[in-house]
Image (cartoon, coloured by chain):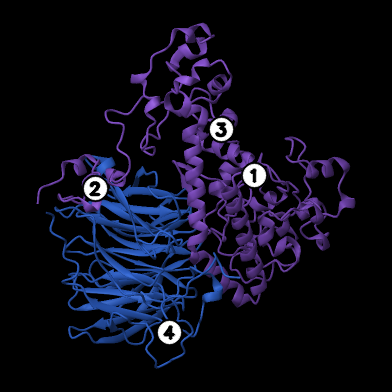
Amino acid sequence: MSLFGNASSFGTGGTGVFGSTTTDSHNPMKDVEVTSPPDDSISCLAFSPPTMPGNFLIAGSWANDVRCWEVQDNGQTVPKAQQMHTGPVLGVCWSDDGSKVFTASCDKTAKMWDLNSNQAMQIAQHDGPIKSIHWIKAPNYSCIMTGSWDKTLKFWDTRSPNPMMSLQMPERCYCADVVYPMAVVATAERGLIVYQLENQPSEFRRIDSPLKHQHRCVAIFKDKQNKPTGFALGSIEGRVAIHYINPPNPAKDNFTFKCHRSNGTNTTTPQDIYAVNAISFHPVHGTLATVGSDGRFSFWDKDARTKLKTSEQLDQPITACCFNHNGNIFAYASSYDWSKGHEYYNPQKKNYIFLRNAAEELKPRNKK
Amino acid sequence: MVVCNFFLQGRCRYGDKCWNEHPRGGSRGGGGYNDSYSRSGGPPQPRGGGGYGNRVWVNPSQQRGGYIQPSSFSSQGSSDWGSGRGGGGGGGGEGGGRRENLKSSDFSFSSSNRFSALDASNAFDKGGRGAAAGFGTAGDEDDDKKLEVIQADVDAWESSGQWGFSCYSTFKTPISGFTDLSPEELRLEYYSSRASGDLQGYLNGVNQLLSQWKSRVQELKIMNPSTRMALLAELKGTAPQSSSSGFGSATTTGFGSSTSGFGNKGFGAPAQSSTFGFPALSSGFGSSSTSSPSTGFGSLITAPTQSPSGFGSSAAPSASSFSFATPSADKPPPTASSGFGSASGFSFSSTTATAGGGFGSAFGTAAASPGAGPVGDVADGLFSPESKLTQEELNQFKAKRFTLGQIPLKPPPANMLVV
């Protein structure tokens, strides 16, 4: 029995390929493959901040590990180090100075990994798996924010075992994003809460979700003055909502668009609808990338409301994506996201992380 | 290129074929109307409800402007008409009640064709059903539209192969019967049960969830009158929501929400046959007493704290589960509900047959069985044998609907389930 109906297989001949040498569509975009990828699905990716020279990529996976690679300018990737949790890793983030990596796992703990000493220590504890982890750097404090399936949002000073603050949420945290002074958390049952982080974190507003189905990913975008002004919210229904916090004209400024669906113009056959697994904004251009269960990534310009590019279809869903600090590199991970249940899970199938040059393709479309 | 003024207003008739420029980002809302009939020009008519935007074609006969009340009209007990509606016909028959009047042969001037649209229109046919919609409110048309939207949505959802364990909401109200479960939660469940060796429990659980979802989807697609009424009540915010409300959110079907473990096993304390009202414990899980240890799921919430781990601890299982529309609902065995709330199903661990591996309990299938009484009665698992039910209970199960206050606490016998 397949979960949720006829599952069209991904790509052509991609499934169940065991090291086949025939042309399989695992990398139709011919992007750079990261060496030694994790052995199980990649749940999250993060590039090092600008304060560090060079580009370092961190990936958390369902194999309970977090891996770090150095990405050199010629495109070569060098595996550097690895840390383990006792449960699948669901979230990773860097500290602002690039010396530490924070990892959040289903084992209900979050760890701080000091890259220089290659030591990791636990800094957070929840009653349920931790889904999201972000570093907050405010003028008067710094802390880690963790969102968990135990319906709480906790803030941790890494030196103390007790949270600095714990906020109750209406439901399990499904995704979150932080761009100081704003934080957005999307929860189960279509919950959407915005927090303001100045002085100390507090709930700013609960928003009626613009989407009809389960929230899957969220990403904050900034305005021309580099201040966070809204967010993009993706759902399992192949749709992304762009929502501004205080728009001059909400009805016109906020909108949703469909993405990651099959046969766009053909209306006779029912459309296949795929979940949007992750959204990332380009740090320089402000354009966004979405990756979906259909195994494609797309670039969009939200101001011109157009699509810039859609990739070819990979043979596996794309589960995570991320831009490096200057927007030159777009990393995306190709691995199974459980969107069709356990039947389509093949532990032998190789997982990939690809790197693509993003300097040109994400330039905004000029408005006429 | 010249910018198309009509496009900016949202009324360009040529759409993509237009020779003028359509700047993106403007008038997106209007884009959909191109190539369809022109709007009736001028401002929208003061129909009772919204939905104007959806109905592009306007029956000219319904326009107020052209309508002149013949004098004979007033003599025919037109008082109903006179009040408020100024000519009845408008708006394609709003107000079910009024329509009844129309239908009657009082209207000798049907020849005038003014109301031909009404007579013939299918809008009218809905008058009968319109009783459900408020009289004098936005009118059945809009409710109908809303229900159609729901039907279409659910249809697309089913055929698209998208993730089914998701909540669904439309017109700002969440539709009951759907609960949110993310792929990661499901996957974690799988990994945990694989590690603990109880994969079958996981499979059972997933199957349960799936069948719950499917039956709810079917319900919404078919849209029989009781579903309709329940939905409309929900949309208007008057739904019993009793149990559900909390449920909805609370459901946390949890994959253990907080505790990863679907542990409910912890919930032991079967006791509760509570079915409604107290989430409780997962009745089914209760039985878990046996199973509890197993599962490797980390933390077990041993204490029957109910609340926590998410499975619904909330009350009232009822509804919320996939298949149930609302507590009051039509469909029989709500039994499931009881279990549902609590424990929510992922108990995967419970190896005992009951509650379908835990999952079941939560969802429908009588997980409640324990509720039926002694937990020990595992053999029956999900259903109670007929002999154990009293006559009243059997009658309740046989009836089309449950009567409040007499809803059986025990699960129905298996042979009474209509699938």
CA distance separating discs 4 and 3:
58 Å
Q: Residue at x 43, y 60 (%)?
A: A268
Q: Which mark is residue B14?
A: 2
User: Residue B359: percent from the left, percent from the top?
Assistant: 66, 61
Give the blue chain's letter: A
Q: Earlier in the sequence, mark 2 or mark 1?
A: 2
B36 or A39, nearer to the observer: B36
Q: Is residue B221 left or right of residue A110?
A: right
Q: Are marks 1 and 3 in contact (CB under 8 Å)?
A: no
Q: Are marks 3 and 2 in contact (CB under 8 Å)?
A: no
User: Residue B115: percent from the left, percent from the top?
Assistant: 47, 24
Residue B352 visible, this orientation: yes
Please say if B170 is above or below A23. above
Location of mark 1 (residue):
B316
Same chain for mark 2 and mark 4? The answer is no
Q: Check the image and name the residue furthest to the right.
A: B387
Q: Are marks 2 and 4 in contact (CB under 8 Å)?
A: no
Location of mark 3 (residue):
B125
Same chain for mark 3 and mark 2? The answer is yes
CA distance separating discs 1 and 3:
37 Å
Q: Earlier in the sequence, mark 3 or mark 2?
A: 2
CA distance separating discs 3 and 2:
34 Å
Q: Are marks 2 and 1 in contact (CB under 8 Å)?
A: no
Give the purple chain's letter: B
Residue A200 visible, this orientation: no
Choose mark 2 or mark 1, whichever is in front: 2
Q: Report the chain holding disc 3.
A: B
* Kind of residue indicated by mark 1: Ala
Q: Which mark is residue A350?
A: 4
Q: Is residue B418 left or right of residue B192?
A: right
* Kind of residue indicated by mark 2: Tyr
